[in-house]
Each structure stands twice: as structure tokens, then as C-alpha cells.
Amino acid sequence: MTDTRTIFVLNGPNLNLLGLREPEIYGSDTLDDIADSLEDRGKELGFEIDLRQSNHEGHLTDWLHEAQGAGVHAVILNAGALTHTSVALYDAVKAIKTPVIEVHISNPAAREEFRHKSLIAPVARGSICGFGTYGYVMALEAAAKI
């Protein structure tokens, strides 16, 4: 059973390839490395981390709904490329009362034009971009303050 001392960390398409995919943009940390960092910091802050990744929009949508139903404290969401295209994720974030913090490893505003607009940002509690994988820890610390 999940509770208010749990934080969901949801990762979208291609984030399973971290450490291999374009390390010049995303760095060499893997999703497992991120999980380890978050679990360590989460313990210090008194939170359990539930990290998930899917290449499918519907899974992310279901998990956002589950976050509210389970009463989790907050969601850290890196929707990957779906950030720029998914009305379904926009609607899911907007529909739930659970605070959502958007995270991006790179700075989308400094990249290709199609990455400049986030559909998630207007309905998220806040966004953290461009600090590499440390952005996840920053988001966790922000979530702890909510």
C-alpha cells in the first residue's frame, strides 16, 4: 500500500536507454543510477521512492491516476518526448490533485525548436531542466518541501 511518504518517479519513452543514448546530451548515468541516488536521498528525507519507466503513454497516464488514488505525496515526471506531444498526459496531470514536478535532464529550450514547448509545464507544480540527472534529486528535495 502506498501512502503520503511515497514519491512516484515516472519516466517516459527512451529513458530506459539512459547511459547509452546520446551521452553528450544525457550523460552516462543510467536509470538505475538515478534510482540509487533518489533512494539514498529519499531515505534521508523520509520518503520511499517508486521509480517506473514505460515507453507507452497509457502506462504513464495510468500511473498518474494511480498516484492520486494511492495518496502519494508527489510525482516526479520526466515524460521524455511525450512532453511536447501528449494531450493525454497534460489532461492526466491537470486532473489529479497530487503535485507533479516536471524534470528534464537536458534543457529543452536550448535544443531543437520542437522541444521548446512543454504541454506538461502549464499544469505541473514546477519544472526542473538542464541540470543533468541531478535534476531528479532537486525535484525530490522540492517535493519534500511541498
Image (spheres, helix red, strand yellow):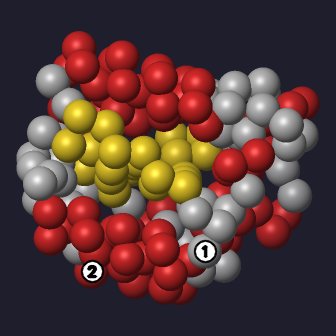
Q: Quadrant location of the N terminus?
A: bottom left
Is 28 above or below relative to 9? above
Q: Which is nearer the eye, 110 or 103?
A: 103
User: From this viewpoint, which residue is outermost toward the front?
Assistant: 1
The amino acid beneath tag 1 is: His
Can you tell which mark lies on residue 95?
A: 2
Gap between marks 1 and 2 measured at Cα: 19 Å
Can you tell which mark lies on residue 96?
A: none
Residue under the image location 58 percent in, 31 percent down = 32
The residue to which callout 1 is attached is 56
> Dot 1, crowdedness within 10 Å: few (<14), some or many (≥20)?
few
Is 96 above or below relative to 33? below
Of label 1 and label 2, which has the lower sequence position? 1
> Is 39 positioned to the left or the right of 37 in the image?
left
Can residue 124 be seen by looking at this rendering? yes
Q: Which is nearer the eye, 80 or 58?
A: 58
Residue 7's x, y, as percent?
A: 27, 44
Occupied quadrant, residue 25: top right
> Is 65 positioned to the left or the right of 117 in the image?
left
